[in-house]
Image (cartoon, rainbow, N blue to C red):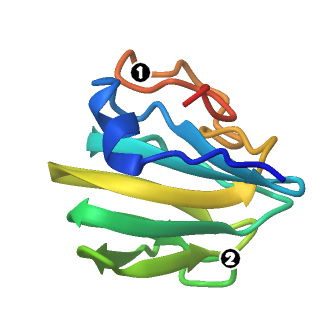
Amino acid sequence: MSSDVTNIDDLLASFDELWAPRIVARVNDWAVKIAKVRGEHVWHAHADTDEVFVVLSGELEIARRDPGGEPGGEALVRLGPRDVHVVPRGVQHRPRSAGGAVVMLVEPASTLSTGDFAGAIPDHITATSGLAG
């Protein structure tokens, strides 16, 4: 029987990097990740999986370009503490937070944080499937 326990507050205190998700736990082939975020991420999609965002603190906006929507049309989802939102597979999205937030992500462990983005990754973003907690 495993007695492994990870305290989220302790893990958050162990790093300062933004947009660099840390793995809190693994469940089967899925990972529970936390990230500190501020500013804008890149537009990207995950073709094969949904992505669950849980805001633990702060505020997060997720701009979405839904397939089948108006060309060039975007929807904006605003999340506050304890709000949950699922971005369906294949939907282009760009998370951002003006004042900063702490976000929990639930997704397959191999999911790359920058999804299908093919450009140069900005310096403030770490392209990863999750860093060790």
**Which residue of the protein is positioned furthest toward the left in this rendering?**
99
Q: Is residue 37 above or below residue 130?
A: below
Left or right? Give the position of 110 relative to 129.
Answer: right
Residue at 64 percent of width and 28 percent of height: 128
Q: Where is residue 24 drawn, in percent x and y?
A: 57, 45
How many callouts does the rendering have? 2
**Looking at the image, which is closer to me, 82 or 72?**
82
Q: Where is residue 63 drawn, in percent x and y?
A: 40, 66
Residue at 70 percent of width and 38 percent of height: 112
Q: Where is residue 50 drawn, in percent x and y?
A: 72, 69
Residue at 23 percent of width and 62 percent of height: 57
Observer able to see residue 117: yes
C-alpha gap between disc 1 and disc 2: 26 Å
Callout 2 amino acid: Pro
Left or right? Give the position of 113 relative to 46.
Answer: left
Q: Quadrant of residue 19?
A: top left
Residue at 33 percent of width and 31 percent of height: 18
Left or right? Give the position of 34 relative to 119.
Answer: left
Q: Is residue 121 above or below residue 129?
A: above
Q: Quadrant of residue 116?
A: top right
Question: Residue under circle 1?
Answer: 122
Classify the position of the C terminus by image quarter.
Answer: top right
